[in-house]
Amino acid sequence: MMTKVELETFVEGTTHYFATAANQPASVGSPYIVQEGKPTIQEFTGLISIAGKRRGIVYFTASRPMLTVMLMRMGETELTQENMCDLVGEVANTISGNARRDFGKDFMISVPTVVAGEPEKIVTPDNIRSFVIPINWRSHSAQLVVCLE
Amino acid sequence: MASANAKAEPLTNGKLKLMICDDSNIIRRKIERELQIERLQVIATAANGKQAVEAFRKEPADVVTMDITMPEMDGIECVENLVKIKPDVLILVISALSDKATAIEALKKGANGFLCKPFTDRQLTEALEELLRGAGNDD
């Protein structure tokens, strides 16, 4: 089970990502537990598998309109599906990688897996609770889902 | 094809040769846009360590930006390989892995600097300028 302090690492990482890479701060809400069913999946999802000292997954899921604006804010001119897949993977990778500052180097992260529009491909472990960190950025909303043993 | 001991030929315009290695296309393009500055010219980009080593053998760069978490061959192993080919190459590791142990390992393998993702354009430029200053290329 994750602690409040551990979750704060991901909240801070998300806040830092948007302020720095997307050039505009996001409003990052308090994490909540998914009580029933699966967490929300949007059009594009970047997923990182975690191994080592902790096991589980971390994923970032967002809509095409949000990713389009993020790419533009980053100076990218090619607003393609390929770059949107790239971006969700990079967001998940960056926030998970930054978490090693607190979790240490035994918090081992995979390269990103990207899923576009196929929510059934995102599988969270049944025996672990998923925490959703809601992200509101400009008029868009996205989620960072953290599911760790 | 360049040998394993190949020495970089300076570009005729006097610029330093830059190679960008990152598995993210948007990060490669971001770095390329920002680093097309006076003294650097991008000669190669690579999406993983293996591609980077192959490109480097063909044409060694003077300066390399290197991600760590990549498929095929990670950045730490790649740094080690590049330094064997060209010991005086300047390598700036740009990674999300923000624990001290990873930065220290990269520096031990031969990297010259470490910039943590996410980064602003200004942080990237300053990190590169510091790298070049440290190597005496600040004129």
Image (cartoon, coloured by chain):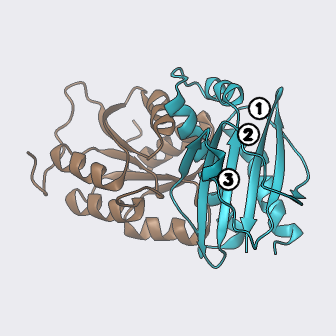
Say whether disc 1 or disc 3 marks the residue closer to the N-terminus. Answer: 1
10 Å neighbourhood of mark 2: few (<14), some, or many (≥20)? many
What's the mark number on residue A135? Answer: none
Q: Secondary structure at mark 2?
A: helix
Q: Secondary structure at mark 3?
A: strand
Q: Quadrant of residue A10?
A: bottom right
- Counting from the top left corner in percent of width and height, residue B129 is at 48, 41
10 Å neighbourhood of mark 1: few (<14), some, or many (≥20)? some
Amino acid carrying mark 2 in the image: Phe
Q: Chain of mark 3?
A: A
Say whether disc 2 or disc 3 marks the residue closer to the N-terminus. Answer: 2
Question: Is any part of residue B118 visible from this angle?
Answer: no
- In the rendered image of this protein, which colour is used for chain B? brown
Q: Where is mark 1, residue-wise? A: A24
Placement of A141 over or under A111, stated as above or below:
above
Q: Secondary structure at mark 1?
A: loop
- Counting from the top left corner in percent of width and height, residue A139 is at 83, 26
Q: Does mark 3 fall on the same chain as mark 2?
A: yes
Say whether disc 2 or disc 1 marks the residue closer to the N-terminus. Answer: 2
- Counting from the top left corner in percent of width and height, residue B87 is at 25, 60
Badge 2 vs badge 1, beta-carbon distance below 8 Å:
yes
Name the quarter where the C terminus of chain B is drawn.
Answer: top left
Look at discs 2 and 3 and give the one toward the viewer. 3
Q: CA distance from mark 2 to mark 3?
A: 16 Å
Q: Where is mark 3, residue-wise? A: A59
Q: Where is mark 2, residue-wise? A: A18
Q: Chain of mark 1?
A: A
Placement of B9 over or under A54, stated as above or below:
above
In the image, A61: left or right of A9? Answer: left
